[in-house]
Image: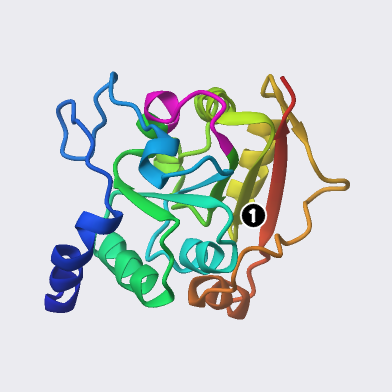
Amino acid sequence: MSDGQERAWEEFAPRYLLEVERSEAATSVHPEARLHPAEEYGRAAPLVVEIGSGQGHAIVHAAAQRPHEDFLAVEVFRAGLARTMLDAARAGAGNLRLIEANAPEVLASYLPEASAQEIWVFFPDPWHKSKHNKRRLVDDDFPPIARRALAEGGLLRLATDWEHYARQMREVLDRAEGLERAFDGDWAPRYEGRVMTAFERKGIERGREIRDLTYRRVR
């Protein structure tokens, strides 16, 4: 991290970062570790979880604009978490928490079952080389853990600027049990709650189509 990010981490981690019991790896989550949202946020409110929050542009903006909801950013890179905390403090987003952890473990056990009103997966690493496709987050193992964390009627929102990954996401989620499309046609409309970031703008400038998908937990 840069010196500024180090300072942000030291100053703001006590306020924003969730302490979690680890298993083995530095970003692992112990299978018995649990988040208690009402205790952590000090209230009962809808919970929105962003997987792979990067530098936090989308979730900080949303948390500042939607104070009556709670937000959780899940990320493994400390530099991104440090930037997120710094921007959250500047925006006065007291309804945001961060966890430095592997997303699948957060969804599979750390979040209480049916606790998230929305889960966001915006521009995950596409691992665009064929030999690396198996590293993608959204594969056949992903829908069951996402569904577990979602409340009934809750929404899974995804976006990517890689056509091949978008089609893989759609194929995987279309055949998943307990999830249904929440859009008509081939793709969902752009989610208005997603702030336009430099990353998304760069993809558009390079001629890549942004593909959105939205699925609802039905049972």
Q: Position of residue 180 (x, y in %)?
A: 76, 31
Q: Residues within 10 Å of mark 1 (few under 14, many from 20)?
A: some
Q: Residue furthest front?
A: 42
Q: Nearer the viewer, residue 101 or 20?
A: 20
Magenta highlight range: 107-116
Q: Tell me if I can see residue 1 in this picture.
A: no
Does 77 sit left or right of 156 as displayed? left
Residue nearest the viewer, comparing 133 with 109: 109
Foreground residue among 178 and 15: 15
User: Residue pushed farthest right?
Assistant: 184
Is residue 111 found inside the magenta-colored segment of the image?
Answer: yes
The reply to whether residue 202 is visible in this rendering is yes
Q: Is residue 54 above or below residue 91?
A: above
- Reply yes or no: does residue 68 show up in magenta: no
184 w.r.t. 104: above or below = below
Residue plotted at (53% across, 40% down): 44
Q: Quadrant of the N terminus?
A: bottom left
Residue 200 is situated, as x and y percent measured from the top left of the image, at 56, 71
Please state the horizontal and vertical placement of residue 162, each as a whole percent of the image.
58, 57
Please give the residue where the numbered disc 1 appears in the rendered image. 163
Residue displayed at 29% across by 60% down: 81
- 10 displayed left or right of 38: left
